[in-house]
Image (cartoon, grey):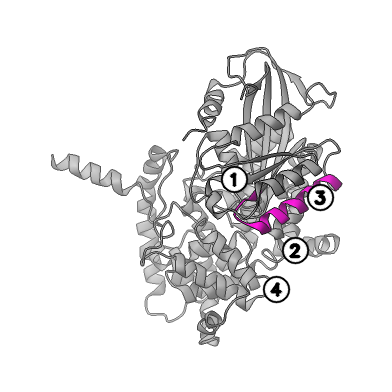
Amino acid sequence: MANRGSHKPNGSSPMCQFKLVLLGESAVGKSSLVLRFVKGQFHEFQESTIGAAFLTQTVVLDDTTLKFEIWDTAGQERYHSLAPMYYRGSQAAVVVYDITNQDTFARAKTWVRELEKQGSPNIVIALAGNKADMANKRMVEYEDAQAYAEEKSLLFMETSAKTAMNVNDIFLAIAKRLPRNDDSGNRQRTQGQHLEDKDRREVKEGGCCSK
Amino acid sequence: MMSALNSNDLQHKSEIDPYGFKHGDDFDYATYDEFMSQYLGVLARRASKWNQLLDGISRLKKSRKVKRYVRKGIPNELRGQVWMCVSKADKLMEENPGLYQRLLSEPLDPDAQSEIDTDLHRTFPENIYFGNDSPNGKRSSLRNVLTAFAQHNPDIGYCQGMNYVVAMMLIVVKDEEKSFFLFEQLTKRILVGYYSRDLKGLKVDQEVLGELVRLKEPAVSTHMEKEQVPWSIPTTKWFVCLYLDVLPIETTLRVWDCLFYEGSKIIFRVALSLVLQNAEAILNSASFPQIVEAFKHFASPQKHIDCHNFMQKVFQDSQPLKMATITKLREEFNKKI
């Protein structure tokens, strides 16, 4: 991954903040993807999210410091009516499904449609086929999801929060596609170094796909 | 040698709290130990008062004295029994013999069952009673209570968040059927509409809270509006999980003591107190994400370990709060939502 975010100390690089939301059916692994990306951790049984959880992660990409403000939402249908609160104003969305469950892919498609209609006009949408480590139970073909993603111009990767496969990559791919020189008011100059080195190290650890 | 063994033993034990939860890496043992050293005395005093109160009576009747006792905390060994009594869940159970068993003998709608089953392994995985499928575990009881409830209330079914509340009831009440009736009382009489498909009761109460904050601390209310943070963002988990994983367990249970005795008002009292005590932190947060972080920081199971002091402050901060005010606001927002 030649274009993966670099981690060199960087005191005065331009800084962009992005609001990103995770959507998808219950138990597809939204919280697990975030936990892997932000803390480099994985829990086999991740507690179900109530309401939504807010986390941040900072990465450096091509000398620009990017701060993701991540909303990890509850998946159950009855919490659906709360979702607009979280995706409204989001520059990016990760719509997650579980490759071992066809229903969750159908649900992902309805999320994409809703975002197209009601999300920000230039929202960057990524489709994540999670639980790729369980390919022996696969119910959603890679090619089908890829064809759908192409048709809708979505970023697409199969991911595994468990093995860390493609987790950082999908967030970084989003970051690369986000407009960074716009005048949306999200761009800020950092004053001196106020990013913690700890955050960077965590990204690096989480970036290993070989576990 | 002996003392070293003892201290190791003690340390090993204290990694798990009396409710079966493993303390996280960030658990503040120093603060906890300091608090417990004086709270144990309080607990002993309360236990003896409660034993006197219950001595020779067949049924606890509501009174100013009992209300005061409940506010000061129900001793853990009496907690399940007192909850059942003051919520009248025990009466409901008496009036409906065989209901629970009958509900479990019928198959549940497969979609509802699958929603429940999806969350069973994701409910308190760090708790010794729920972390595995062992025979002395409570995971199958959790499945049964949620299933019976969904069967009995097809219009509500299963709502995420119920899993935590029922699991905590099972830990305290230690009986499936009793927990089922206690949860019935909670959803039918105490927190109506919180878990419904449209979450209307929840949404109404979040608006009510916003209005109560406006009345008590208008600056906070204005600031939240200016930064466009709806109250449902920080408070959905507070209300749905009834402060589980928002406050420490012991503190949460002290809130529940009042919930079963006094009803939903305590939910607002706690929320108000949290907001009022942290008004400065909220006002000093200059943006949406900063406000959210501020809430995350002060409404955390790592804070408010001193449940006794916390509950005293809750009642001080939220006084006076009339049920009539809440009822009137609920009616207003019910029309708007």
Kind of element beneath mark 4: loop
How packed mark 2 is, by other alpha carbons closer than 10 Å (few <14, some 14-19, many 20 or more), is some
- Residue under label 4, please give it: B155
Locate residue B248, reporting x and y percent.
49, 49
Asked if one can make out residue B68 in the rendered structure from this viewpoint, the answer is no
**Please, what is the three-letter code of the amino acid marked with disc 4?**
Asp
Is residue B69 found inside the magenta-colored segment of the image?
A: no
Locate residue A92, reporting x and y percent.
75, 37
**Please, what is the three-letter code of the amino acid marked with disc 1?**
Ser
Residues rendered magenta in the picture: A97-117
Q: Which chain does tag 1 point to?
A: A
Q: Have a look at marks 2 and 4 and say if they share a chain.
A: yes
Asked if one can make out residue A151 in the rendered structure from this viewpoint, the answer is yes
- Splitting the image into 4 quarters, where does residue B45 fall? bottom left
- Which mark, residue B198? 2
From this view, report whether residue A210 is shown above or below residue B178: above
- Which mark, residue B266? none
Mark 3 or mark 1, earlier in chain: 1
Foreground residue among B8 and A164: A164
Residue depth check, mark 3 versus mark 2: number of the one nearer the observer: 3
Q: Which chain does tag 4 point to?
A: B
- Which mark, residue A113? 3
- Splitting the image into 4 quarters, where does residue B334 fall? bottom right
Foreground residue among A194 and B105: B105
